[in-house]
Image: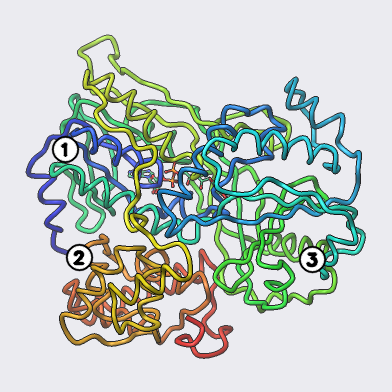
Amino acid sequence: MTERPIVADVRERGRAQVVIIGGGINGIATFRDLSLQGVDVVLIERNDFASGASAASSHMVHGGIRYLENGEFRLVHESVQERNDLLKTAPHYVKPLKTTVPIYSFFSGLLSAPMRFLFQKQGRPAERGAAVIKIGLTIYDLFASVGRSTPWHRFRGRTSSLRELPMLNPDVRFTATYFDASMHDPERLALDVLSDGLAANRSARALNYVEAVSRTDDGIVLRDRETGHEFAVACDVIVNASGPWTDLTNRALGAETRFMGGTKGSHIVLDNPALVDATGGREIFFEHSDGRIVLIYPLKDRAMVGTTDIQADPAQPARCTDDEVDYFLDLIGDVFPDVPVSRDEIVYRFSGIRPLPASDAEANGQISRDYRIEIDQANDGGAPRTPVVSLIGGKWTTFRALGETLSDVVLGMLRLPRVVRTRGRAIGGGRDFPTTHRAREVWLRSRMQGSGRRGQVLLDRYGTRAERVWDLIEEEHDDQLAGSALSTRELMWMVEREHVVHLDDVVLRRTDLAFTGAITAELLERIADALAPLLDWDAARCDAEVRRTTEILRDAHGVDFASIVGDPAERA
Ligand SMILES: Cc1cc2nc3c(=O)[nH]c(=O)nc-3n(C[C@H](O)[C@H](O)[C@H](O)COP(=O)(O)OP(=O)(O)OC[C@H]3O[C@@H](n4cnc5c(N)ncnc54)[C@H](O)[C@@H]3O)c2cc1C
């Protein structure tokens, strides 16, 4: 395997002001922020960008109304502000999400829930009744009132609720409907933030498939996982943003920390049009019989169902188990008893570990979702070594604010001023994005004349960057690979601009082919063949890539090609 030029460049320079470990959304957000301040920063990620916890989310950009129960007012306030901001700065991926909570009682939880959020009492939540949900939603709406672009919440009685959502369990007494936001393509949003960070500063570098393995007196040792070569990079500050693996990374760097206590959460994606219809196009967010808040969420013509919250060891891979699948099928049956659902309709499973702080909370749902920062000056009584700044926690929703906060800490250590703020700053293809149907039509006609269905796909996938992708596609002959979902020239864009190293980078994170169940063994081979000339793969490497992706799909996502029915091109 030959060394990638970008890796050679970082190795030869051998120095940066800051090295960030972890290319999840929080490492990427911090990278963008520091790069915008003119800092010479290198981001390293041992797998692909946004492939850890950042690839396992419920796709919600939300204030986390549930966190009010735990008294996390600061976090909820920040989250709704960030949600409002993202609806404007990243409208290509972040859209308003109508959310309905079915409620089966009036008073339940009335005493326990406010007691807990006011006085931090422990204990499992009692069922949340209408009165508690009303109080919570009112606080939530008030927090969101600055810069809000979505309507206030509404309550409905049984008759009106069932008129709106006729498949809902007829025992429902009320529904509460409010707005949060959905992230349709989190991994692509992360790539956009990354590419803005790279564009902001000529010295900034981002390397995937490069791992932090140890520390030197003046920096860090990295391993290129593609070649196996190790090299040292000297730096003034190391940022450990390795999410659930923060303690493990610190151990590799020679420091024993006990910051983390993550929990595993899984989701399934079902190809069940009746279930998608039953949701009425909105997220159904509700309390299951065990007190957990769960969701059924229509996304990309599929129904995503989640999630669990189970203590987990980050040293082990997180997998969605059959027991979790049973739990999901059970909760669907509770809320939509007359919608038939079968295991065969599951087209994709995914699972990840939340990077939560170590906690002695009685229930996993009560562990704080807020973030904090710890600095290890690591003098060891001898000569000062490069300090390590560890991030503990941090949701998807708050990545911008977190990136700014973490970056301020680093700027303080470097004695550098902040020169740019990121609030309100458009992200990637969210710049000048046409948000109405008519504006989309006009935009596509004026910028991507004749692109037809392909233009729609590219606009959804890249936002307004689609215009540049289309220019590249139009330059030479282009072959369709999966109907209008992917083409050979588009793969060239991904390889040149989006850090593609492996086949699974395309299938799992640059497109939604796997998520929607549109992938087949044959399509995998076609994409591998199309990537071969772009990445200099011979036949043996193509086979190895197909095997690798097939194994990841089977092991981590429960994808069994034989069970996928229909033409992938049509499904895509
Ligand atoms: C089931 C579930 C549902 C969720 N739902 C939501 C939601 O709806 N909304 C929301 O806002 N948040 C949600 N979250 C939380 C959110 O996804 C995470 O908090 C967030 O993505 C964390 O990002 P991160 O960058 O801190 O961590 P990660 O994305 O995990 O990134 C850390 C990275 O560090 C890398 N790494 C580790 N060790 C090394 C090393 N030695 N060298 C180099 N790289 C290394 C890893 O490979 C990883 O990619 C959910 C999380 C889960 C698990």
Could you say where residue 376 lies in the image, as x and y percent from the top left? 35, 20
Could you say where residue 441 lies in the image, as x and y percent from the top left? 41, 74
In terms of sequence position, does the residue under pointer 1 or pointer 3 come before the other? 3
Using residue 301 as the reference point, say whether residue 104 is left or right of it: right
Q: Which residue is mark 2?
A: 496
- The secondary structure type at the circle numbered 1 is strand
Q: Which residue is mark 1?
A: 232
Relative to 219, is 295 above or below?
below
Using residue 526 as the reference point, say whether residue 476 is left or right of it: left
Question: Three-letter amino acid code at disc 3?
Answer: Glu
* Quarter of the rendering containing residue 236: top left
Q: Nearer the viewer, residue 303 or 15?
A: 303
In terms of sequence position, does the residue under pointer 1 or pointer 2 come before the other? 1
Relative to 84, is 157 above or below?
below
- Rounded to the nearest angstrom, the CA distance separating label 1 from label 2 is 26 Å
Q: Residue furthest top?
A: 381
In the image, the residue with mark 2 has its CB under 8 Å from the nearest atom of ligand 1: no
* Quarter of the rendering containing residue 486: bottom left
Looking at the rendered image, the disc whose residue lies closer to the viewer, 2 or 3, is 3
Q: Which residue is mark 3?
A: 164
- The secondary structure type at the circle numbered 3 is helix
Q: Residue at x 35, y 77 (%)?
A: 455
Could you say where residue 310 lies in the image, as x and y percent from the top left? 65, 46
Crowding at mark 3 (Cα within 10 Å: few <14, some 14-19, many 20+) = some
In terms of sequence position, does the residue under pointer 2 or pointer 3 come before the other? 3
Q: Residue at x 79, y 45 (%)?
A: 291
- Rounded to the nearest angstrom, the CA distance separating label 1 from label 3 is 61 Å
- Rounded to the nearest angstrom, the CA distance separating label 2 from label 3 is 47 Å
- The secondary structure type at the circle numbered 2 is helix
Q: Residue furthest left?
A: 12
Question: Three-letter amino acid code at disc 1?
Answer: Ala
